Every structure is written in structure tokens, then in C-alpha cells.
Amino acid sequence: MEYNFKEIETKWQEYWAENKTYRAKDTSDKPKYYGLSMFPYPSGAGLHVGHPLGYIASDIYARYKKLTGHNVLHPMGYDSFGLPAEQYAIQTGQHPAITTETNLNRYRKQLDKIGFSFDWDREVRTSDPSYYKWTQWIFKQLYNAWYNKDAKKAETIDNLEVIFENEGNGTVHADCAETPTFSAADWKGYSEVERQQILMNYRLTFLADSWVNWCPALGTVLANDEIKDGVSERGGHLVEQKLMRQWSMRITAYAERLINDLDTVDWTDSIKDQQRNWIGKSVGASVVFKTESGHDIEVFTTRPDTIYGVSFMVLAPEHELVAEITTEKFKTAIETYQKQTSLKTERDRQADVKTISGAFTGAYALHPFTGEKIEIWIADYVLAGYGTGAVMAVPCGDQRDYDFAGHFGIDIKNIFKDTDISEAAYTEKDAVITDSDFLNDLPAKKAIKLAIYEIEKRGFGKGQTNYRLRDAVFSRQRYWGEPFPVYYKGDTPYLVPDEQLPVTLPEVDKYLPTEDGEPPLARAEDDAWNVFMGDRMEHNTMPGWAGSSWYFLRYMDPHNAEAFVSKEKAEYWNQVDLYIGGSEHATGHLLYARFWTKFLNDMGYINFNEPFKKMINQGMILGNSALVKRLGTYTIFQNPKDSEFISDAPHFIIESHKSRYYLEELDIPGQTPILISHDLCAKSETGWGMESSTIHVDVNFIDGNELNLQLANNWHNDFKNAVYICSGGYWYKNNFVRTNENGTDIFTISHEVEKMSKSKFNVQTPDDLVEKFGADTLRCYEMFLGPLEQAKPWDTKGINGVHNFLRKFWRLFHDAENNFEVSDAEPDKAALKTLHKTIKKIQEDLERFSFNTAVSNFMIATNELTEQKCNNKAILSELLILVSSYAPHIAEELWSKLGNTESITKANFPTFNADFLVEANFEYPVSFNGKMRFKLSLPTEMTAADVQAAVLADDQAAKYLDGKAPKKVIVVPKRIVNIVV
RNA sequence: GCUCGAGUGGUGGAAUUGGUAGACACGCAAGACUUAAAAUCUUGUGUCCUUUGGGACGUGCGGGUUCAAGUCCCGCCUCGAGUACCA
């Protein structure tokens, strides 16, 4: 083989590892460059072709920076805590640490084969105790801090205690939970427990009750993501809303700074917009409505100017006052509605805009200005977790309120002058207010100001800025996450002292919740903990984003045992200069990482305020998913004769073109289907219709459209020994039972192009391609696919063309018999022109991150030099340096063949010389009325007037002029000639 | 609904500041080599018309600005992503 990529790639990968070619030095005279890619979660499916897309781009740029004289930090690590390893542990009993280690080794092998310039001595793993020791330490700093609104930064809680000691809390302006005012004397009189309770209101991480999706059957909390069609994706169990005491992070304290500082980073506008919208700043007023029975209902409104248009109020069904104010007559209806709501996820409640629902409590509030009686309703469009969980409804100015009023026959008052609200609410802010006492004849803007002034003056509210952003829940009822450095005496939490960190994960007998729904850590015996204090340890673990909120700092100083990062190293490496990763993290990771960076900056541990100076978001590589449908498990098949059938409780998998299945259709001979639960069924004329939900099958089980049942049958519980129903009958435990003569025994799936992800089981790994074409080809091909930022479906059709380019490139350095042969002669003009044109293109493309066009330009250069039969050493050496950041293995090999003894990574990026591109003539495109007709070669230095004369004198022009004189002639030197006839 | 993207040959895409639309590659077709196939190489390849000179049309649709528009402006359509009863 002429270009033996396998041999070459192995050889250089070993060389790089042995010589630590990519080690970053912490001190240098060179300017620093910190290039980072989002680290992967090492899933069991292996690295997929979407991961390297960003890594390759990041690698090319880091190599380019090195060639241009920078001290480069380009690290990689693993986000190694997470759910899939835990789920695997639950199924197999295998400790997640072992699974993770296996997966991680596979990832490492895959990454090594692609030839990245990572400094592996700096690898971090979030699940490593030496790493999460510092995650726990940062948690402790957050616990021991409060947010001082006056100073606009976080401060230590010790200093807050001093203030309480001296002056109580009256003078403190903190971002905190509502706390009654107390004096210094009060404080001194409080017990230890009382003091801790008060401090909890101020801490940046604190215990509070939050709503969660509780799945009683699984004994665990589910993410919105894990819920499909109202039931758990795994197992298909019912999910309800539940209030749970959990750790939260007071990210809301940073809301304003998180919005403002977006102006200081170089990110795409769309990511910045997403964050701004997520934080959702809105300016308005908080107003208290008294109920007839004397309770206070606080609402937040952005339109206090419309307060005279209030015609009812709506509380979230979970609002704490609902039970108290509901009158006897409406009690049953309210409770029914509350129950209904509790079965819906927040996402469902928000998604369904068309169905208007709600219930009247029987209670009335009094309008603060008019004293008028206002009905109080509950409705699921008001969310308990947002704002105060209560709304003053102004149907004339809000479409949602308008629809609600219309649906329930509530009066609609119009307080906007000269507007028509017979069809819809008037939501523009340009109307003049009327029928509103002191607000009459004012435009909205002025009316808002006056309304707030009046509300404050009369003492039933105040001007307020609200954020949509909520405090981030930080507890997970899982095993495979960071344990909290927290223990309890009674119900009061205390921190484990620094010297005892880390609190490592204790061994447990099972990775499942306990019988009474406690998290898995509650299973650990007291002496299974490396640290055990107080009555018990914290049983929750931290969420996935804990470790990833600060990992970019640890790379700077990965082995430091004294600090999470030394101040000097943080100062040297500073912000990440270029961060490449997916835009799907816009409102998660990227927001939390900014939050922690700001906090650590406030506390003086690092000297910068934003983690990622510039960011590029690579487009998703889309995969081809395989879909089937599963009938709800609550409809369990029961056969009195076959007890095994019952104990196995098999799932029923149907082909995905069917949306609903009738019990009677199951038609399994000798067995009688009996519904033991009706939760997910509806009786119709045809019989009991069972709802189904769409689920993914591993694409590795698919051949064309056919599902390989043997493979599926051995997969996880939902598929293991399931009943697979196809058109001709059903498969159960690898036996086919025919129930329909006309159908087939082939089970077909349907496809959908969507995000490539482990949870969708549609992952394609790069391994086969590396094996067949080599890493250099894969690297160039992934870049060649199209613009980095654009989403694209994965397709390997074009990879041959890219591979051919590398072979052709190899041949520039070799004769027909594959002997290395280059010439030492002076380079000729044509070759110099090709080279310098390419230097210019490649540099420009790199600077604007246009990786795909760079590959095209390499191809063009290779084609031209092949055409010129150029094997000039001087030319090829420089071209090789350009290519080396894209295809490093072949570049190293040829570089050493050229007689160099050091790695090509130590070379200097070639300098562009414009002199070589100077041409004596320019071929002018000559247009008539904007249409290009012919080309004419003229001297470059010819003046516009001379060009015009030359063109008009040309024979070809006469034809298009057709004897007429041109109306106008435009000449743009060295560009174009356009003649208007 | 809102926000942000995108829409160019059979396909992925190029055109960086308004100046030759379709670079580069895939696919396809024909030819060369071969007993044959694969691989490789060469040539052609936007569509339609054509007297083989060339002509007309052409960057989602409809307008506009301009000597000149894929690019700028106005209005619309389709697709994708994100996001929401946010009060």
C-alpha cells in the first residue's frame, strides 16, 4: 500500500505519548492560549461521531495556535458521574465505578486513535474522589456565603453573623428567603437551632421544599426528560407532583449579573438570547390583595397600570392558601381539580394551551383600590414555582386571562380607551387608560410609574423586578453522584470539616431507593461511610452539573492537593480562550458554570468573572433512530393457566405505525387477556383501547427496517422477553405464534432523524471509519461535512473523496513506485503562487473557524501541484505545516521523511507573501446589463478609462452592442466591467 | 404563539466587503486499463431549447433598491432549533 495510514498513525501516536509532545507548561514567555472542548459523559455506547466533530475543530485550532507561537493548554477529561451507569448498576448489580472505568477506558482508546493533541497528564474525572473533594469544598463555600445586595457580591456567612450579633437583620440587604426582622438582642436570645434556621434563609446553598416529578413505582424522582406521555419512559409507570425537601443553589442572586455580563463575552447572539430569556428579567410591581376572610394574596404584575381591569384572581392549584380559603360548597370540585393537576408534569401543563381548565374556590378577594369583590379561581396555567404562584387576571389586556374569562363566563372590563376587545385582548402597550380613577387618560408607560407610586404610598405593595430564573435544585435521589459534605443532628444540617474531605461514596447492597422511598445512600451502614458524623449523613447526592461547573479550572492545576486551583495558575491560564461545545447546554451547564465562576471570583479565589471568553457551538450530528411502541404496563396480561406469564409481567411491543391497540386484538390463543388496571385504557365500541408510547430501540438491533428480536429479547427490562406483536402474530420468548394467516412474522420499526445520543440508542461510533480510512481521513472528513455550527445528518458517502485527497497528497512526495522523492531546486513561480494562495486561504479560514473550506483548499492545492508535477521540497515543507493541524499523522511522517528530526508541532506557521500572487494581467468578466458575456484579459495596472476603451474596441463587444452606443459603462478595476445598453 | 437560524444542482456544500452563481467533493454517465469485476485514471455533468454558433431560465415565493442582488430592504411560504400559559 502506498499510503499506509495504519502504520503511520500507530507510530506517531506512540511517539507523541512517549515524548509528551502535547504537555502544557505552566510558565512561558509565549502568549497563552486555553482551548477547551466540552468533556464527554463516558456512556456504554462509546464515543459517537458527534463528539469528535467539536474536538477535531478544537484540536485543529489548538495546533494552529501552537504553530503560531502560543503556549497552549488543550486538556480533556470525563464527566463521569451520571444516570446510565447507575441504571446499569441497578440492572446488573455491577458497581457504577467499574462500569464507568470500563467505558472511560474505551473512550480513551477511541480518542487516542483520532490523534488529538490533548495533554493527558491533566485529565480530570468528576467521579474521582480527588476531584470531587473540591466539588464538595466549593459546596461548603456556597453554604458559608450569603449575597450582599449592597456590595453586589457574595460574602462569608461569618461576617453576616457578626452583623446579626451587633445590629440584627434590619440593615441587611440580602438576596434571601423571606425572614422576619429581628434585633441584635433577639439574635442573642435565639437557640442554636433557631440561629441555623435563620442563617439557612441567607445561605447561597440551602435546604428548601421544591416540586418534583415523583414516581411511586420506581420510588424515585424523574426529570421531565424521563417522562413520556405522562408515564415514566422506563417501565411506563405513573408520575405525580410532590413537594420534597432538597438542597438548592441561590443562582437567582446572580440573575442581574448573569444578564449584564453577557455583554463581555464573545458568544453567538442566539445563546446569549437563550440565557437572557431563561433568566427572564421583568420589571413591575408586587401587589397584595386581601381576601374577604383576611388572608393576603401576593401577586406580581408587569402591568400595574391595568389594576382597575382586574376581574378575577387565579392561584396555582398547589398554592398554600387554596385549602384555607375554599368554601365548603366548592371543596370537592377544588380537590378533584388539584388531584388532576398533580398528575400532570409542569411541561404538560405548559404545553397544552388549547384546553382551558380551572375551578372556582368560592372565595373572594377585595380590590385594593375599589374594595370590589373579586372571584378567586385556581388553574393549572399558573405555576406554583413561578413568582408568587398567584395572578391578578386582567382579561382586557392579557389573551390568556381573556380566554379564561370567556370560557367561564366572567365579566371582562375594558380599561383601554378606544380599543375593541370583542374578539381578543388588547395586549399592546400603546393604549390610553380609562375608567381607572387616578390613572385615567395616561399612556401605559406613565400609568405604570404612577400606579407603583400609589401602590407603595397606600402600602399594599411595591415596585419590584422579577426573574423567571428559579433557584436550582441541587439534590438528586441517586447513588452515582457526589455525596454532600453534610451530616445532620436532628433536622439541622452541619458541614463536614475540611480535613475530613472528601466524603466518599459508601458501599450499598443495592443501588435502588429504600422501601420507604429514601435515596440509595440511606441503605449504607453507618460504618460504610468514610466519614460519619451526627445522627446521619446526607442521603442525597449532587446533580450532574456540579462537577462540570468548575472543571475548566481544575485543568489548570489538576494535581493540587491544597486547593481546587492555585491562585497563580488560575491567574496565568485565566479564561478559556475558545470553548467548543453544543448549544443544547445554553441554559444548563453554561449558566451554572458562569454562576460558580462569579461566586469564586467574589470570594477572591480566582481573578476573572466569566469562564469562557469565546465560544463556538458545533451543530448536532443527527442520527437515524429506530422506533417502536410499547403498550402501557398498567394493562397487564393475565392468564390463569400460565403463572409464569404473570410473574414475568412482559411488556407488549407493537410496530410503531399503530398508535392504539385494542385488547381484543391481542388474540393470543389459549390465553385470556385481563386488564388489571384501567389507568391508561379507554373503553370504546371496539373494546378496551390501550394507549401506547413511542420508545427507542438500539439501532444495532436493526437490519434495514427489521428488528432483530433475538438481540432485543436480551436487552433491558422493557424488551426482555416482551411480547412482540407483528402483522402475522406475535413473538414471545423467541417463539412465533401465528394468529393471522395474511400477515408476516417480521417485526418492522420506523425511522426518525434526530439528535444522536445515548438515550436515543442511535449512536454511530467512529471506530469502523478509523479502521478503514484512518484518523487523518476521519478528521478531514468530519470538517469537510459542512460549517461547524450547522446541524447535519451523519452520512459516510463522501469519505472516499477525502481519503483520495490524502493519498494524492502523499503522492506529491513520492514517485510512481512509492519511493520518497523531493527536489531541492528553486521553487518555480506557479508553485509559489499555489503555496501562498493556500497559506492565505488556510489562515483566513482558521481565523473565521471555517474548517470545511480549508479542507477544500488543501484539495485545490494538491490538485494544482499534482498538475504542475511539483515535488519541490521548499514548497511541500510549508504546505505540510499547513496540513499538519488537520492531518497530523501523515504530516509527521512526511515531515520526518523530509529530514526533520523534531516533531512538526514545533514548526512555525508559514508566512504569507503577497508578492507571489501579483499578476501582470487580469481576466475581466464583461457583462452587458449585468449578464456576463465574455472575458477579456487586460493588464492589471490599466486605468479604468483604458479598460473601458479596450473593452468597447474588442470585436466581441460589437455583437452585444448591436450598433448602439452604450448608455453607461461601469469599470471596477481588477473586478468587473458592466455595460448598459 | 414567540425568539433565533436555515432554504443554492441528483447529494453535502462554496461564493469572506453587493461585482464571473454552483468552488471542492459525492453521485451519475461515457471512455481507458482488465478475460471479467473491483480499484485506478481520463472526460462530461444546473435545467430547458438549439440549426451545435449559441439562446432562454436559474439561489423557497412575490415585490423593491442598484449599472449589478444568493448577498441589501419590504411582505409572505416552508423547514429546523430553542422556548413559554412568565402574569
Image (tube, coloured by chain):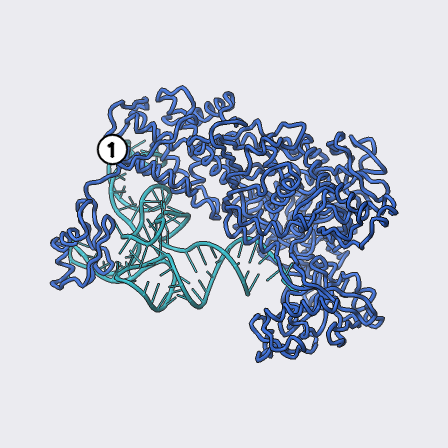
Between A94 and A728, the one lying in front of the other is A94
Compared to B33, does A217 lie above or below? below
In the image, is A762 to the left or to the right of A851? right
A22 sits to left or right of A536? left
Q: Quadrant of the N terminus of chain A?
A: top left
Say which amino acid is labelled 1.
Answer: Gln
Q: Nearer the viewer, residue A84 or A929?
A: A929
- Label 1: chain letter: A
Residue extending furthest toward the front:
A166
Helix, strand or loop status at disc 1: loop
| Location of residue A655 with respect to A856 vertically, above or below | below
What x and y, as percent, mark residue A817? 30, 23
Q: Position of residue A36 (x, y in %)?
A: 53, 37
Nearer the observer, A641 or B48: B48
Q: Which chain is cyan?
A: B
Chain appearing in blue on the rendered image: A
